[in-house]
Image (spheres, grey):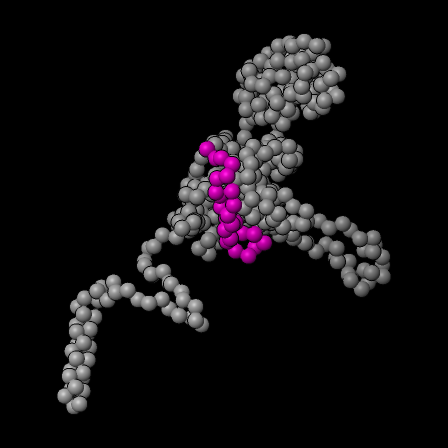
Amino acid sequence: MRRLWLTFAQTVTLCVAILFVVKTLKPEWLNAWPTAPASSGGALIVEAPLSQGASRPGSFAEAVQKAAPAVVYIFTSQEVQTPRSPFLNDPLFRRFFGDDYDTQPQRRSGLGSGVMVSADGYILTNYHVVEGADEIEVASSDGHKYKARVAGTDPDSDLAILRVPTDHKLPVITFGNSDDLHVGDRVLAIGNPFGVGQTVTSGIVSALGRSHLGINTFENFIQTDAAINPGNSGGALIDSNGNLIGINTAIYSQSGGSLGIGFAIPVSLAKNVMEQILKTGAVIRGWVGIEVQEITPELAESFKRPDTKGALIAGVMRGGPADKAGIKPGDVLLRVADKPVEDAQSMLGLIAALQPGSTARFILWREGREITVDVAIGKRPKPQAQAQR
């Protein structure tokens, strides 16, 4: 019995020694040894092996890490005049509250997002984010804060360019190609909703070329179901590679929160507006001085038109390019520079794309037949909101 016990003890000692040597010199041999699944409350589970740099199926972490540093927060404030209360004229009221009670300045604050698009400190955002603001502060994702100034605005497209000092290297976003987007493509929205801090939401492109929304004068929105909330305006809409494809602008909501329908300005339009602002200080668009309205089926029948395509000329500005070319109220505009006019909204875009000073051929429907006129294109006047800034 004693001999058996000594043999067992020696065998155990030898095994422990071998295990120690293997653990010290060849630990990978032990990692390759199959292990039994862990047991938790009688249920068998299998855990995935931990490894550095493992790929995450369905993850967009790399895209976010690429784009997020270039998305900034925008804080605005402006002095507002409150209506004078009739009580302020009451001598008894003034006796208790003082004569200067109604002269105290009041400020209104605003919140939005923006995208750093140039190492020179230029930031792309929405016009409505900075509209009327007399103080603008920009906070970057690394905690730096800057006083920003407005470098240029374009209310017609709801875009604005800000500039901040470049006292250190600024992260810049990479531009993608919004013209290559398809319905169903995965997109991510980055911004500062409700001021809670940088937030990323995901979704797909649910529609392209959205217009007739009454948001901007010129509309060609990307529609997405990625959650966009107040404070996201001016933030980045990126693709799965982290490239900028749109500027988040508006949501469809009856409650003020996201209902899964958001709209973004395509980066192709934003880039064109930005380049014109930085080059000339303003966006130059074509203009002919007409007012138009949509053609209803009833109007199409009265004008003896086979369909509702085109734009009805409702008014002509006296002395404007259209007036000089002989265009009259009641004409139906069918083509602009050989491009068909689908409706009144598309007509605005076609004319705006024409170069001021050039001449374009317009095809009209008048008194049951087509006529052709050549129109000298003028320069679109500044919007009222911009002229007052």
Q: Split into 4 quadrants, where in the image is the N terminus? A: bottom left
Residue ranking furthest to the bottom: 2
Task: Place residue 222 in its image quadrant.
Answer: top right
Residue 51 vertical position relative to residue 285 in the rendered view, above or below? below
Q: Is residue 25 left or right of residue 349?
A: left
Give the extent of the magenta segment: 180-204
Residue 23 within the segment the image draws in magenta: no
User: Can see residue 387?
Assistant: no
Whether residue 387 sits left or right of residue 181 in the image: it is right
| The image quarter in which residue 368 lies | top right
- The residue that appears at 30% across and 66% down in the rendered structure is 35
Q: How many marks?
A: 0
132 or 265, which is in the foreground? 265
Quarter holding the C terminus?
top right
Residue 226 or residue 355, whichever sits in front: 226
Q: Is residue 201 above or below residue 367?
A: below
Q: Is residue 191 magenta?
A: yes
With 189 as the anchor, is 8 left or right in this view? left
Q: Nearer the viewer, residue 114 or 121?
A: 114
- Percent coordinates x, y for residue 351 in the rendering: 58, 22
Work out whether residue 15 can be spotted: yes
Q: Residue at x 72, y 13 (%)?
A: 304
Q: Residue 188: where, in percent of width, then height? A: 49, 46
Please tell me which residue is depicted at 52% across the width and 45% down the height of the picture.
Answer: 203
Q: Could you say where residue 261 lies in the image, as x and y percent from the top left?
A: 60, 43
Q: Is residue 129 left or right of residue 174?
A: right
Residue 220 in the image, given as x and y percentages of width and height: 57, 33
- Residue under the image location 80 percent in, 64 percent down: 96
- Please tell me which residue lies in front, 303 or 77: 303
